Amino acid sequence: MIDPKTLLERAAQLADQATGEEDAGIRERLLRMAEHYRDLAAHEAWAHENPPSVGAITSALSSRAH
């Protein structure tokens, strides 16, 4: 797992970089990348708060075997 704080820091760096970017295409790409990092941070935070149970994992693996 990746620390959500690290992902949010990277998102902030990309957003700051986008603010100073003159090329509109590059600016939009940086902002999309920042949004992706924020989404990843939210996912990692949720996964940390809701770890899968052993029963859920074995159930998922068992259903794939059939």
Image (tube, grey):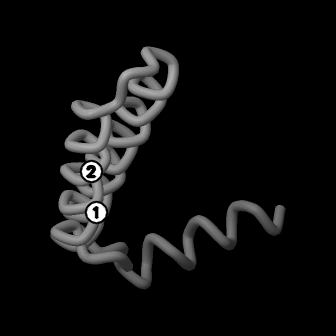
Amino acid residing under circle 2: Ala
Amino acid residing under circle 1: Leu
Where on the picture, by quarter, is residue 43? bottom left
Q: Measuring from the top left, give residue 64's x and y in whole percent.
A: 75, 62
- 63 over 24 or under it: above or below: below
Asked whether disc 1 touches disc 2, contact meaning CB atoms under 8 Å apart, the reply is yes
- Image quadrant in which the C terminus is located: bottom right
In this view, which residue lies farthest toward the right?
A: 66
Identity of the residue drawn at 23% across and 52% down: 42
- 15 over 42 or under it: above or below: above
- 33 over 6 or under it: above or below: above
- Gap between marks 1 and 2 measured at Cα: 6 Å
Residue 50: image tag = none
Circle 2 sits on which residue? 11
Q: Seen in the image, is 12 located left or right of residue 27?
A: left
Circle 1 sits on which residue? 7
Identity of the residue drawn at 33% across and 42% down: 34
Local secondary structure at mark 1: helix
Choose between 50 and 21: the one closer to the eye. 21
Choose between 23 and 38: the one closer to the eye. 23
